[in-house]
Image (cartoon, helix red, strand yellow):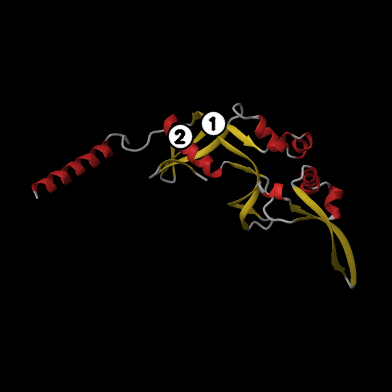
Amino acid sequence: MIMKKYISLNNICFYLLCLFALGACTPSASRENFTKGMNSYLAKSGNLCLAKYDWPIDVPPEEFEIGSRNAVQMPVLQKLGLVSVSDISVKAMAGKKAIVTTIKRYQLTDNGKKFYLLRDSSSIAPNGNKILHRGDFCVAKLSLDKIVAWDKPAVVNGREETTVSYTYTVDAAPWLQDADAKRVFPMVDSVVQGARVAQLKERFVLSKDGWVAKD
């Protein structure tokens, strides 16, 4: 009984020391702690994807006329052997008249399926509604190179937050080196070329598990 009281008193003393030691018992804003949090974040969310969630992807003639994203990108993916294409006839009514339109339907090939990952993500529809997705076509994986800097933490909604700057490495699909792929995916090419040089930023919050990426 005496021993139990002694342990209890020591625990109380320990927690009191934590409270009065200016946060000494919580993870500090340090390179080591941000490195740990960033590695965890990128391991889970470091995939660079193209927002091509659902397949097959149909591209009607009017999209080719205006040069939409899919109209420009899908033929390049076809050239690279990542998708196949077929012509599909679609019937639509214009008043009382039936109009048949031929669209291009793109399907992932066996090689293309290697880049389709099951991952939860979301996007915003034109009406503002949130759309949940269970997969995406992903072409590169980012990992941490090094933590460069971070802002002085500030309390936001009762929790400490900060913005962390870092450089990264990239494990990219080999076909991204194709000239046409670089042309139709300029943002992806920019990220790939920026490996170990370009700085990205991530918002971090101090939680019970330490410093973690906010999103």
Q: Secondary structure at mark 1?
A: strand
Counting from the top left corner in percent of width and height, residue 88 is at 84, 60
* Residue at 69% across, 50% down: 52
Residue 28 as seen in the image, left or right of residue 184: left
* Residue at 72% across, 38% down: 175
Tag 1: residue type?
A: Tyr
Vertical position of residue 118 compared to residue 89: above or below: above
* Residue at 73% across, 50% down: 109
Q: Secondary structure at mark 2?
A: helix
Q: Residues within 10 Å of mark 1 (few under 14, many from 20)?
A: many
Counting from the top left corner in percent of width and height, residue 104 is at 83, 55
Counting from the top left corner in percent of width and height, residue 96 is at 89, 73
Residue lying at the far left of the rendered structure: 2
Q: Give the residue pinned by disc 1.
A: 166
Q: Give the residue pinned by disc 2.
A: 34
Residue 172 as seen in the image, left or right of residue 212: right
Q: CA distance from mark 2 to mark 1?
A: 10 Å
Vertical position of residue 8 compared to residue 21: above or below: below
Counting from the top left corner in percent of width and height, residue 35 is at 46, 33
Tag 2: residue type?
A: Phe
Work out whether mark 2 precedes mark 1 in sequence or the reverse, and give the earlier one.
Answer: 2
Instruction: Depth check: give the residue in front, 61 or 178.
Output: 178
Q: Residues within 10 Å of mark 2 (few under 14, many from 20)?
A: many
* Residue at 85% across, 49% down: 64
The answer to whether mark 2 and mark 1 are in CB contact below 8 A is yes
Residue lying at the far front of the rendered structure: 110
Residue 159 as seen in the image, left or right of residue 140: left
